[in-house]
Image (spheres, rainbow, N blue to C red):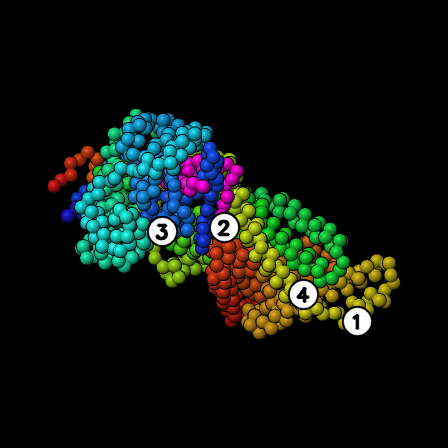
């Protein structure tokens, strides 16, 4: 099997070409330790089988982001891949020099290359004419003009790659003329045993395989190279700069020779950008686009979510009817099935959000948003690209955390993911609604026309944002030190989105979420179910609800009510005596200073599943809901019980809402953080810091409020 | 010194064809700029400056990129076609 890699700058249509070449055989995996997609596929050519690797798009092999590091690591065999028989470098002819720069770097690794000049149609439209033969003669390697989107040139590319596999010398690129400093460095490197061990004694590959270290530590080249260069009195940063200049110095006249540009009126992209990047018009358009995206995630996925909820209850009712009562039935329905349903409810929002994001990315608009929002985000020490993930988090933190994948710098991405849970997601709203209705509904309007409840709700949204900005500020100066990744972003030409690409991205994200995150959610749901179920505890036979059933006549409406009450009494009794219930009582001394009793304590533990679960759990704690006819009545009953049994005052209500605004009460977010960071360290860190902060803020609200004489 | 020549890209006028004189080495960011093709002699033009010292929109060679003013401060430029003095 021949091993072939596809390398190229971003926005060169590399993935389109990869999909053309591999069709349905494409397989998506992960690189060890990092959550970057690894796409591979096969293609049958004659009696040969090609194994194709789609590398992440990169401008250079000197890495400035983890994605770029991957391209370098794969090409140099650091992931254990076999040496490549050929590397197809996909090239945008409109930016020939910058694209050939990467081709030279790949060739310097000693790998045979084929240049695929993609998007020749767009180049022609842009007034570029190119002497392909001259380019081939100047470079030495095969050069294939093509339009991958239409499949044009695929056959020629196949032939060129086959010829390079048969004779690797055909894929060699003519030597860049290096300046003296590089020659001196090469000479110095000759003293390194590893270089001497090579048959050809060529040190070029050795320097070329070290650039990642070179950039990451900006000095460290590995001890022996460092020593060799220091002995030869060579400045590393000067060497690095000289190598870049030398490549361009070789490429610039070459490109000049083979291309002619005829003047064209301003392109569509230029004309659209005059409007789309305008400080006023562009900002308005930006707000509109983000508004539609947010509305879509927040509201338009509701019917689908309701349908999934309905389907899940129908499925659990059906399975319940098949199984005999007992522990197995309970664990299946309240643990596993609840976990599966708890995973599926995120599907609509994730689908809609990633449809939106990949559409924006594919059209080229996502890069523009970074330009428009950068000034504001910079104040928080965040990159412009964290705007979309944070905005999406207002709908739901789970897709928000997933959307942070578009951020290239690992530190920026991590900070964004860690503050995303502070955005007020829609799951907090039912909690706020019940509490506000219970203790603030009859408050006097502020200034005579503003509802206090509305003001509090606004305040809670703002609280989340302000705390998030402060946390980002602190994290940037402690855990994730160093400047935010520099904004240095190409504005690709606007393009019509390619349906296939967009759907593929959505499907990949969804599948990843369902398989990887779903299993963590199911496991956590089962654990939480066990906490609320064990140890088993029977309702005493002399309990009034028990007595009420035995003393009422069978088959009467009174008996039905009594039975329903008995059911609730049993649930309440079980919950109170379960591990979770005992935990609620145990933590009472700790949460009493926040104004919470042990009942709310159980609610806090139970709502760890998801914030909105607080209401049904509280219903269970109070044994309420037997009489409630619909959700509204149930919510009112829970609200009443909070006031009556847990002594909730406006101040306690405020303290509880502040706690919910900050605390990480959502195991799906924990699961997605675990998957996206590929470790348990960061989700645990998030839970600890968020819940500590929530505790302290609630404490400040309750104690401060009391000190000021409020109740 | 080359530092003294020309103007800094961050302060250069809008919509004027410029050419790069030098890029000083102030970190990974400037490495990336040079790899992008911001090499001595390359053509640049400032297309837009976002308000309140926001990012710059720049045409470099034949593509458009955005960068913050602090990165642009590392780049010295002069009007295109002008003879470098000295």
Structural distance between the alpha carbons of marks 4 and 2? 32 Å
Mark 4 vs mark 1: give the one in front: 4
Give me the residue at 85% from left, 64% from top.
Answer: A552
Task: Give the residues in magenta.
Answer: A1-29
Label ID, residue A628: none
Label ID, residue A485: 3
Marks 2/3 in contact by CB < 8 Å: the verdict is no
Q: SS class of the residue under badge 3?
A: loop
Marks 4/1 in contact by CB < 8 Å: the verdict is no
Marks 1/3 in contact by CB < 8 Å: the verdict is no
Q: Which residue matches tag 2? A: A402
Residue A67 relative to residue A693: left or right: left
Output the chain of dot 1.
Answer: A
Q: Is residue B30 above or below residue A619?
A: above
Taking the magenta stretch, the answer to whether it contains residue A20 is yes
Label ID, residue A533: 4
Q: Is residue B78 above or below residue A461?
A: above
Residue A507 relative to residue A83: left or right: right
10 Å neighbourhood of mark 4: few (<14), some, or many (≥20)? many
Q: Is residue A301 above or below residue A332?
A: above
**Of callouts 2 and 1, the N-terminal one:** 2
The quarter holding residue A275 reads top left
């Amino acid at each position: 099997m021949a091993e072939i890699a596809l390398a190229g700058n971003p926005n060169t249509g590399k993935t389109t070409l990869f999909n053309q070449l591999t069709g349905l055989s494409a397989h998506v995996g992960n690189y060890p330790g990092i959550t970057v997609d690894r796409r591979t596929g096969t293609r049958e050519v004659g009696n040969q089988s090609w194994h194709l690797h789609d590398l992440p798009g990169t401008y250079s092999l000197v890495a400035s982001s983890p994605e770029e590091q991957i391209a370098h690591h794969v090409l140099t065999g650091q992931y254990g891949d076999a040496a490549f028989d050929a590397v197809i470098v996909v090239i945008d002819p409109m930016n020939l020099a910058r694209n050939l720069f990467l081709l030279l770097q790949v060739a310097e690794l000693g790998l045979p290359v084929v240049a695929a000049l993609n998007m020749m149609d767009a180049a022609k439209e842009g007034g570029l004419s190119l002497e392909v033969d001259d380019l081939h003669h100047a470079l030495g390697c095969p050069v294939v003009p093509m339009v991958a989107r239409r499949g044009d040139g695929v056959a020629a590319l196949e032939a060129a790659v086959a010829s390079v596999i048969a004779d690797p010398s055909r894929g060699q690129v003519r030597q860049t003329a290096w300046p003296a400093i590089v020659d001196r460095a090469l000479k110095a490197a000759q003293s390194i045993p590893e270089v001497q061990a090579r048959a050809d004694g060529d040190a070029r590959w050795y320097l070329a395989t070290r650039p990642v270290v070179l950039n990451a530590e900006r000095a460290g080249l590995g001890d022996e190279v460092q020593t060799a260069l220091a002995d030869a009195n060579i400045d590393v940063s000067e060497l690095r700069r000289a190598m870049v200049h030398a490549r361009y110095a070789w490429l610039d006249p070459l490109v000049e020779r083979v291309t002619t540009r005829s003047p064209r009126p301003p392109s569509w992209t230029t004309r659209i950008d005059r409007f789309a990047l305008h400080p006023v018009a562009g900002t308005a358009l930006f707000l509109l686009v983000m508004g539609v995206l947010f509305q879509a995630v927040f509201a338009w996925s509701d019917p689908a979510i309701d349908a999934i909820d309905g389907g899940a209850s129908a499925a659990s009712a059906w399975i319940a009817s098949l199984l005999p009562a007992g522990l197995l039935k309970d664990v299946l329905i309240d643990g596993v099935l609840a976990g599966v349903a708890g995973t599926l409810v995120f599907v609509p929002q994730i689908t809609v959000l990633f449809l939106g994001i990949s559409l924006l990315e594919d059209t080229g608009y996502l890069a523009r948003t970074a330009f428009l929002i950068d000034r504001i985000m910079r104040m928080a020490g965040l990159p412009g690209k964290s705007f979309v993930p944070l905005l999406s988090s207002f709908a739901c933190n789970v897709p928000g955390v997933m959307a942070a994948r578009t951020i290239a710098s690992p530190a920026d991405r991590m900070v964004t993911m860690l503050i995303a849970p502070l955005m007020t997601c829609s799951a907090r709203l039912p909690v706020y609604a019940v509490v506000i209705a219970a203790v603030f509904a009859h408050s006097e309007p502020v200034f005579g026309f503003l509802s206090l409840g509305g003001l509090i709700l606004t305040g809670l949204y703002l609280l989340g944002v302000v705390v998030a900005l402060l946390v980002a500020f602190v994290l940037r100066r402690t855990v994730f030190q160093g400047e935010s990744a520099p904004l240095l972003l190409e504005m690709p030409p606007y393009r019509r989105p390619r349906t296939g690409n967009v759907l593929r991205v959505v499907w990949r994200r969804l599948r990843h979420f369902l398989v990887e995150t779903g299993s963590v959610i199911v496991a956590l749901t089962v654990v939480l179910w066990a906490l609320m179920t064990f140890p088993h505890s029977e309702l005493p036979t002399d309990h009034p609800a028990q007595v009420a059933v035995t003393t009422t006549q069978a088959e009467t409406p009174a008996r039905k009510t009594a039975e329903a009450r008995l059911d609730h009494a049993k649930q309440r009794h079980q919950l109170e005596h379960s591990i979770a219930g005992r935990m609620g009582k145990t933590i009472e001394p700790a949460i009493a200073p926040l104004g919470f009793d042990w009942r709310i304590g159980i609610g806090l533990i139970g709502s760890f599943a998801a914030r909105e679960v607080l209401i049904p759990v509280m219903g269970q704690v109070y044994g309420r809901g037997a009489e409630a006819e619909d959700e509204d009545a149930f919510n009112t009953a829970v609200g009443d019980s909070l006031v009556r049994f847990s002594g909730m005052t406006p101040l306690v209500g405020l303290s509880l809402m502040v706690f919910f605004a900050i605390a990480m009460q959502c195991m799906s977010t924990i699961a997605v953080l675990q998957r996206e960071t590929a470790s348990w360290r960061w989700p645990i860190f998030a839970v600890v810091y968020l819940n500590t902060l929530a505790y302290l803020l609630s404490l400040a609200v309750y104690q401060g409020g009391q000190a000021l004489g409020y109740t | 010194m080359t530092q003294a020549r020309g103007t800094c890209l961050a302060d250069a006028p809008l919509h004027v064809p410029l050419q790069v004189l030098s890029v000083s080495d102030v970190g990974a960011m400037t490495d990336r700029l040079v790899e992008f093709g911001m090499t001595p002699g390359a053509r640049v033009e400032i297309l837009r400056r976002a308000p309140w010292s926001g990012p710059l929109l720049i045409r470099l060679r034949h593509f458009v990129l955005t960068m913050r003013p602090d990165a642009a401060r590392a780049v010295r430029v002069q009007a295109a076609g002008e003879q470098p003095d000295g």
